[in-house]
Image: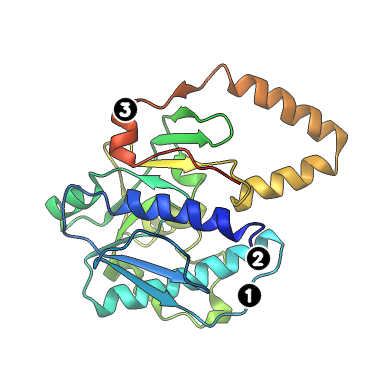
Amino acid sequence: MSGSWNLVCKLFERTLRSTCNQTSSDYQVIVVCHEKPQVSFDTSQVTYLQVNLPLPGADYASKEKDKMLKMQHGLLHAKAINASHVMFVDADDCVSQHLAQFVAQNPNENGWFLGRGFDYQENFRLLRVRHRNLHLRTNTSHVIKLDLLEPEMKLHPDEVKRGDCVLYHIDTAAILKQRGTPLKLLPFRGVIYITDNGENMWWSQQNIASKNNGIQSILAALKSSYQSFITQPVTDSIRDEFGLYPIDAS
């Protein structure tokens, strides 16, 4: 469960606004959730799909399993509305407004991995440019032709886990390549990965580990100091393209 439902809703609304800020109207957003977030933004291109899945535990593996099961539900709904491609977006990240138009212009492609983009530190409100392998850090990382995900749609819930399953983002591009349907590198920066808002699963696990280990705490402090030298402020053009704005965590 989330530590702050109010913060979750604020982060989600920013993500929703970002996702719907596309230059093309040829897209649909499917929000798969246990409980519908409380937001002030709405559009006919957004569908909420509430699922009756077991609530995840506090551990990373349980949360990752819950996420993948929701992704599977989203896939089935995308198939029902005849989507051509799908992109999984975490509920706190921001995406480029050019994605839908780019996909519409390339309808026959297998898809793309978002290797380039930005990390965003919510507490510092700074960006770090990522030149490669960003798709290995965040679930908001791939655009995939829907029919390539038929094997995942047919999995029993007990089979939805890391392994030969595209739904785990670290393995997505590699598995599709093994299947003979490789993805291409998206030719522009496609995502801002939000790293330290307290609701990020990986970041939260790292914070827990740091609190339980004095050496790790020192390393985390050194890393924080190093980050200040390799980051940049958010420009107006990035803010407009990605729909990024500050979130008040209170």
Per the image, label 2 sits on a secondary structure element best described as loop
Residue 92 vs 186, above or below: the answer is: below
Amino acid type, mark 2 = Met
Instruction: From the image, tell me which residue sits under label 3.
Output: 236
Q: Earlier in the sequence, mark 1 or mark 3?
A: 1
Distance, label 2 to label 3, CA atoms, is 34 Å
Q: Earlier in the sequence, mark 2 or mark 3?
A: 2
Residue 55 is marked as 1
Residue 45 vs 231, above or below: the answer is: below
Q: Earlier in the sequence, mark 1 or mark 2?
A: 2
Distance, label 1 to label 3, CA atoms, is 39 Å
Quarter containing the N terminus: bottom right
Q: Position of residue 115 (x, y in %)?
A: 39, 40
Residue under the image location 73 percent in, 26 percent down = 221
Instruction: From the image, tell me which residue sits under label 2.
Output: 1
Per the image, label 1 sits on a secondary structure element best described as loop
Amino acid type, mark 1 = Leu
Q: Which class describes the residues within 10 Å of circle 3: few (<14), some (14-19), or many (20+)?
A: few
Residue 223 is marked as none
* Res 4 quadrant in image: bottom right
Residue 66 vs 7, above or below: the answer is: below
Query: Can residue 7 be seen from the camera position used here?
Result: yes
Per the image, label 3 sits on a secondary structure element best described as helix
Answer whether labels 1 and 2 touch (C-beta < 8 Å): yes
- Indicate left or right for 243 with 197 as reference: left
Distance, label 1 to label 2, CA atoms, is 7 Å
Q: Position of residue 242 (x, y in %)?
A: 33, 40
